[in-house]
């Protein structure tokens, strides 16, 4: 018991400030959310859009209608709904409560891992600034909502910390878990292969690591084949239900630009995409090379579609953004205060929508 107390005291001293920033952001988001409802100035909901689909999967399982677009829930990957279902069962709470709890816990884990990564790279002050940029990112409400954002972010940061320490066994396990959280998980595989090659990993170990990375996704494909007659039901469902197909990056960019005049949502997406592209250019040779290439992959994957919606949310994974701007703003007091004010206001505004 005394040893546990020592460990907790040490963890609080090390991560207390970072966790405090994240928890403060969640408190402000929840206050904003429920204030908007209480005063009748808006109708935000925790079950809107994809959140409702994840909750439906957790409660009723997967559905696939083939050519029928209605009910193609297999388009969504299984790890997050499984966590919701497991938490709901173990704690005897509704699925929505279980989802919000999972998102909050993985948000805390994301905060700790991001802080550890940046603090090790530079110092604690820069680490705290990176945590602020994450906690008050304009689309940060999705980190608390029943979405995969917090889970995937935590797994991804875990992979980068493990790769930095050359702990390839555990990194391969986490990459396997990302592959059944979001399609974006595939972007981590080339980075792993690079580190494995750099460390001259033997073929036997390499095959073992490859199996650990691929097994969860292969299991998901096998389930789809048994349940729906095709291992690619998820891809077909995305195409049928959402009209999404893979396209050249220029197609996605042109689509965004063409949609800009229609709604402010598209204008915000273009603005955030432009900020991230500029960040990628500015951060060349200023952040870890693996992190930089992952950022490039995230941008390319996001725009490589004929239909793009939610670019600002997807850009949360552009990790060089937190690392580069945390160091940049740490040296510029006035600009840092301005960014803090703008980010916090923008995040609360989005929470109210």
Image (tube, rainbow, N blue to C red):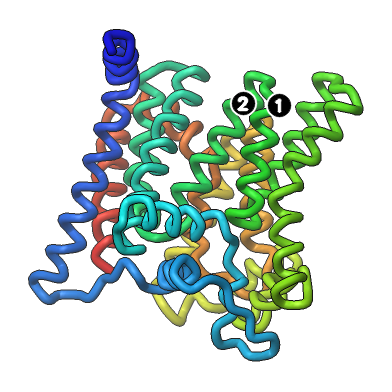
Quadrant hosting residue 66? bottom right
Q: Quadrant of the N terminus?
A: top left
Q: Who is closer to the viewer here, 238 or 61?
A: 61
Q: Residues within 10 Å of mark 2 (few under 14, many from 20)?
A: some
Please name whichever residue, 113 or 279, is drawn nearer the observer in this view of the structure: 113
The residue that label 2 is drawn on is 162
Q: Is residue 278 placed above or below 241 in the rendered structure?
A: above
User: Residue at the left extreme?
Assistant: 39
Q: Where 325 sits versus 55, above or below?
A: above
Q: Could you tell me which secondary element the residue under label 2 belongs to?
A: helix
Q: Which mark is residue 168?
A: 1
Residue 274, image x and y in percent? Answer: 53, 55
Task: Tell me if residue 191 comes above or below residue 138 in the rendering.
Answer: above
**Disc 1 packing (10 Å; few <14; some 14–19; many ≥20):** many
Quarter of the image where one finds residue 42: bottom left
- Looking at the image, which residue is at 66% across and 32% down? 171
**In the shown orientation, is residue 79 left or right of residue 99?**
right
Left or right: where 50 falls relative to 182: left
Contact between marks 1 and 2 (CB within 8 A): the answer is yes
């Amino acid at each position: 018991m005394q040893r546990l107390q020592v460990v907790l005291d040490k963890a609080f001293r090390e991560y207390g400030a970072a966790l405090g920033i994240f928890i403060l952001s969640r408190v402000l988001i929840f206050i904003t959310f429920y204030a908007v409802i209480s005063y009748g100035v808006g109708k935000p909901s925790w079950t809107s859009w994809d959140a409702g689909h994840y909750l439906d999967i957790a409660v009723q399982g997967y559905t696939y209608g083939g050519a029928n677009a209605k009910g193609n829930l297999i388009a969504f990957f299984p790890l997050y709904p499984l966590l919701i279902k497991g938490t709901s069962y173990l704690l005897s709470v509704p699925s929505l409560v279980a989802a919000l709890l999972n998102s909050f816990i993985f948000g805390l884990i994301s905060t700790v891992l991001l802080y550890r990564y940046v603090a090790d790279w530079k110092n604690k002050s820069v680490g705290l600034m990176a945590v602020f940029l994450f906690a008050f990112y304009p689309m940060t409400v999705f980190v608390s909502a029943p979405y995969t954002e917090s889970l995937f972010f935590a797994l991804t940061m875990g992979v980068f910390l493990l790769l930095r320490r050359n702990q390839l066994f555990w990194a391969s396990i986490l990459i396997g878990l990302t592959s059944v959280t979001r399609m974006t998980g595939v972007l981590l595989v080339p980075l792993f292969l690079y580190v494995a090659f750099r460390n001259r990993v033997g073929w036997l170990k390499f095959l073992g690591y490859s199996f650990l990375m691929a097994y969860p996704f292969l299991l998901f494909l096998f389930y789809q084949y048994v349940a729906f007659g095709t291992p690619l039901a998820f891809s077909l469902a995305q195409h049928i239900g959402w009209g999404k197909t893979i396209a050249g990056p220029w197609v996605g960019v042109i689509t965004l630009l063409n949609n800009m005049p229609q709604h402010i949502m598209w204008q915000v997406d273009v603005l955030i995409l432009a900020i991230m592209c500029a960040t990628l250019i500015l951060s060349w040779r200023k952040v870890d090379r693996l992190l930089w290439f992952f950022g490039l992959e995230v941008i390319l994957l996001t725009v490589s579609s004929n239909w793009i919606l939610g670019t600002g949310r997807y850009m949360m994974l552009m990790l060089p953004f937190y690392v580069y701007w945390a160091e940049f703003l740490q040296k510029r007091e006035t600009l840092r205060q301005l960014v803090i004010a703008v980010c916090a206001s923008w995040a609360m505004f989005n929470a109210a929508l």
